[in-house]
Amino acid sequence: MGHWLIKQEQLVDGAASEGATIEASNAPAEADRAAILGALSAFNADHGYPADMLPVAVLLKDGDGKTVGGLWGKTVYDWLFVEFLVVPDAMRGHDFGTRLMLEAEALAIERGCVGAWLTTFNFQARPFYEGLSYQVFGELEQSPRDCVRLFMRKKLACRDDRTAQV
């Protein structure tokens, strides 16, 4: 499916919005994402919350120096978000997952973050994250089908006086 023209909009106050349309797309351009994110970031900054997103990558490499796993995320709005964490099956049981998480958390603390959060599925790593002091703060059922997506967070020891209500 491509782009669909949904309908022409008119402002609530009755003023014409001069050709404005709403379109849904299954293949949006990166420029569209940037336009939306730019407008949201400007709004947030105007209200005292400037975007301060920085990437986080803690890489797990094999003996040949090839990246075979690791942690991918970002720090933004005083929190670390862990988007991906993977340790290949053959490398599990050697604390690589724990070491990857602790390295990312240390980086987040250096950046002034007050906490870390992530999502996992009920069939994935809940006990692992609980062992690192993460707590479930939300669940999304049927995500997908019979799975439950778990939202987990952890308060980090901060370098400054800020504290998180978690």
Image: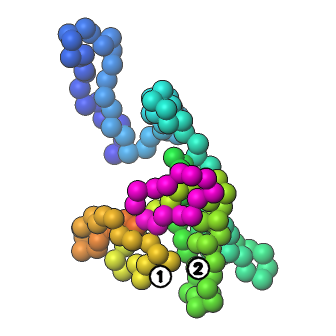
Q: Position of residue 120 (x, y in %)?
A: 41, 70
Q: Which residue is depicted at the point 37% across and 65% down?
A: 151
Q: Secondary structure at mark 1?
A: helix
Badge 2 is on which residue?
Answer: 98
Q: Which residues are magenta?
A: 153-166
| Residue under the image location 45 percent in, 30 percent down | 47
Q: What SS does tag 2 mark? A: helix
Left or right: 151 as drawn, with respect to 91: left
Q: Residue at x 64, y 53 (%)?
A: 111
Q: Residue at x 30, y 13 (%)?
A: 17
Comparing 13 with 136, the one in front is 136
Q: Specify whether residue 160 is painted magenta.
A: yes
Q: Amino acid at mark 1?
A: Gly
Q: Which quadrant is home to the C terminus?
A: bottom left
Which residue appears farthest toward the front when viewing the image? 161
Residue toward you, 13 or 99: 99
Q: Depth check: 75 or 78 in front?
A: 78
Q: Is residue 109 left or right of residue 133?
A: right
- In the rendered image, residue 136, in percent from the top left (x then y), is placed at 35, 70
Badge 2 amino acid: Thr
Q: Are marks 1 and 2 in contact (CB under 8 Å)?
A: yes
Instruction: Name the residue nearer the viewer: 94 or 105.
Output: 105
- The image quarter containing residue 95 is bottom right
Q: Earlier in the sequence, mark 1 or mark 2?
A: 2
Q: Which mark is residue 161?
A: none
User: Marks 1 and 2, Cα distance to the nearest angstrom?
Assistant: 9 Å
Q: Which residue is mark 1?
A: 131
Indicate whether 122 appears above or below 47. Answer: below
